[in-house]
Amino acid sequence: MMRFHKLVATVGGIGFVGKGGGTIAAIGFCIIWLLIPAGLHTVFRQVFFISLILFLGVWSSNNVDSIWGKDSNKVVIDEVAGMMITLLFLPVTLYTTIVGLVLFRFFDIAKPLYIRNLEKWPKGWGVMADDVLAGLYAHLVLWLILQLNLFT
């Protein structure tokens, strides 16, 4: 079972690349996001898959915490969850995806506006929660950019 948790937490091994693994996982999700046929980006599917990733992320992060330590850089499923939240319900375009990626990575790395505080939550909850909030902030800024037609 630990092998399953390692596979999930590292998103198929991406977390083992070391520095930059989170960015690679986020970019990997963006590529998949853009390759999914437009008709499959339904509200139900987006909510279902975000819920599934959040559940698996907390569960697997809780389990690998005992061997890798708290919030190991090997755990990158949180970046996938954050990117999913960033792009939730927004137009599936290359522009939206790239701007979303830049915004999410900014909020995830800089950790402003109480994001860092969420890392203090226990085990997998803290691992996932800070990226959820970074994703929410990135989503709101991206939504505002799209609404105001900035940079287009």
Image: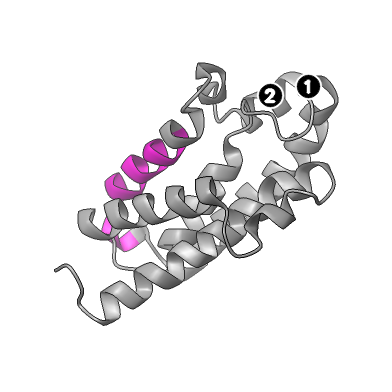
Instruction: Judge the density around disc 2: few (<14), some (14-19), many (≥20) Cα neighbours within 10 Å.
Output: many
* Residue bearing the label numbered 2: 6
Q: Position of residue 93 (x, y in %)?
A: 23, 59
Badge 2 marks a residue whose secondary structure is helix
Measure the alpha-carbon separation of dots 1 and 2. 6 Å
Residue 13 position (above or below residue 95): above
Residue 94 position (above or below residue 63): below
Q: Is residue 93 left or right of residue 47?
A: left
Instruction: Name which quarter of the figure residue 9 lies in.
Output: top right
Q: Which residues are magenta?
A: 25-39
Instruction: Name which quarter of the figure residue 114 lies in.
Output: bottom right
In the image shown, does 2 or 67 lie closer to the viewer?
67
Residue 57 position (above or below residue 11): below
Which kind of residue does numbered mark 2 sit on? Lys
Main secondary structure type of the part rendered in magenta: helix
Q: Residue at x 77, y 41 (%)?
A: 59
Q: Position of residue 91 (x, y in %)?
A: 29, 67
* Residue bearing the label numbered 1: 2
Which kind of residue does numbered mark 1 sit on? Met
Disc sitting over residue 121 in the figure: none
Can residue 18 be seen in this snapshot?
Answer: yes
Q: Position of residue 81 (x, y in %)?
A: 55, 50
Marks 1 and 2 close (CB-CB < 8 Å): yes
Q: Is residue 125 left or right of residue 13?
A: right
Badge 1 marks a residue whose secondary structure is helix
Can residue 45 be seen in this snapshot?
Answer: no
In the image shown, does 133 or 25 lie closer to the viewer?
133
Q: Is residue 27 found inside the magenta-colored segment of the image?
A: yes
